[in-house]
Image: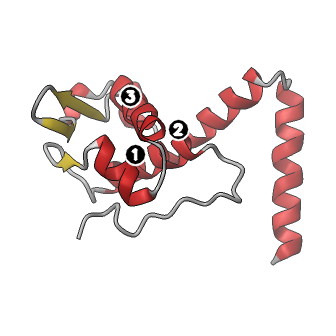
Amino acid sequence: MSPLESFEIDYSSGLPVWIQVKSRIAYLIGSGAYVPGDRLPTVRALAVDLDISYNTVNRAYMDLEREGYISTRKGRGTFVAERHSVGADLAANSPVELLVDDMIRACANAGLADDDIIAMVAARLANKKLAH
């Protein structure tokens, strides 16, 4: 069974689908579910499995490759990158930290100031505490 078989998109999370896919794969690599050299599903196969757009999966894969998590070999497929090809800074970041970085970038791109981002996160945490 592929580590991605149990993955489901959470459309109510507010996170873009491509970030959910990217974060899940980064988490699976970081946790050791995928190890260097493992072949990942093709973009098309993963898009079909998750019932999402090819372009969404492609964006996640392109970001993961740019960050050194995976490498694509023409005609052979997409593979988990060897550890030495991941930059020292990236290797030190957990998938959760990368997710937070993506969230901060998205907020900044939407025009939010740092204080507004902090206030939004604090409010979401407060709402989560009330829900439990």
Mark 3 or 2, nearer chain start: 3
Q: Is residue 53 above or below residue 66?
A: below
Q: Residue at the spot x=44%, y=64% of the render?
A: 7
Work out which quarter of the rendered image holds the N terminus and state it: bottom left
* Residue 55: percent from left, percent from top: 45, 34
Residue under pointer 1:
26
Q: Residue at the spot x=69%, y=56% of the render?
A: 13
* Residue 105: percent from left, percent from top: 66, 27
Instruction: Tell us which disc is closer to us: 1 or 3.
Output: 3
- Secondary structure type for disc 1: helix
Q: Amino acid at mark 2?
A: Leu
Asked if the residue at tag 1 contacts the one at tag 2, i.e. Cβ–Cβ closer than 8 Å, the answer is yes
Q: Is residue 41 above or below residue 88?
A: below
What's the mark number on residue 98?
2
Instruction: Tell us which disc is closer to us: 3 or 2.
Output: 3
In the picture, residue 92 is in which quadrant? top left
> What is the C-alpha distance between the residues marked 2 and 1?
9 Å
> What is the C-alpha distance between the residues marked 1 and 3?
12 Å
Work out which quarter of the rendered image holds the C terminus and state it: bottom right
* Residue 124: percent from left, percent from top: 83, 55
Q: Amino acid at mark 1?
A: Ala
Asked if the residue at tag 3 contacts the one at tag 1, i.e. Cβ–Cβ closer than 8 Å, the answer is no
Colouring of the image = secondary structure
Front residue (pair 121, 72): 72
Q: Amino acid at mark 3?
A: Met
Q: Is residue 19 left or right of residue 6?
A: right
* Residue 42: percent from left, percent from top: 25, 44
- Figure disc tally: 3
What's the mark number on residue 62?
3
